[in-house]
Image (tube, rainbow, N blue to C red):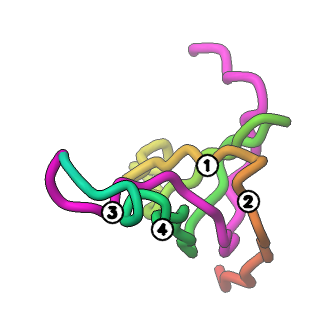
Amino acid sequence: MPKKPKGAVAPHAQIVRWRDHCDPLDGPWHSIDAARRVEPVVFCTVGWIIRETDEFIVMTSTLGEGPVAEVVGSPTVILTDAILDRAPLDVAD
C-alpha cells in the first residue's frame, strides 16, 4: 500500500470561501485603464477536505463509499493564504 502524503486527513465536509487568480478580460490587448480595474475573484467551494497542510488544502467534490471508498472526483487545491472563510458541514451518515 502506498504511503499517504503529508497532511492526509480523514475526509470531512466543509464549505470554503476563497480568493482566486483570474484573467477576466477577453483577448490579449487592453487599455491600461481596463487592466487596472481587474481584481481577484471569490469562490465558494463545497466538498470533502482530504488533505491539509500549512500551505494548502485539497478538496474533492465527490467521495466514494463502499467498494469505491478510495475514489474521489474533481480534486481542487486551494492555497491556505487564499482562504477567506471556512465552516464544517454536518453530513448525515
Q: Which residues are magenta?
A: 1-28
C-alpha gap between disc 4 and disc 3: 10 Å
The type of residue carrying mark 1 is Ile
Q: Nearer the viewer, mark 2 or mark 4?
A: 4
C-alpha gap between disc 1 and disc 2: 7 Å
The residue that mark 3 highlights is: 24
Q: In the displayed structure, would residue 30 be above or below residue 70?
A: below
The residue that mark 4 highlights is: 37
Q: Nearer the viewer, mark 3 or mark 1?
A: 3
Most foreground residue, 30 or 71: 30
Most foreground residue, 83 or 45: 83
Most foreground residue, 13 or 42: 42
Q: Residue at x 70, y 54 (%)?
A: 82
Task: Answer left or right for 62 relative to 84.
Answer: left
Q: Earlier in the sequence, mark 4 or mark 3?
A: 3
Q: Residue at x 53, y 71 (%)?
A: 43
The type of residue carrying mark 4 is Arg
Q: In the displayed structure, would residue 14 be above or below residue 57?
A: below
**Percent x, y of residue 67:** 41, 50
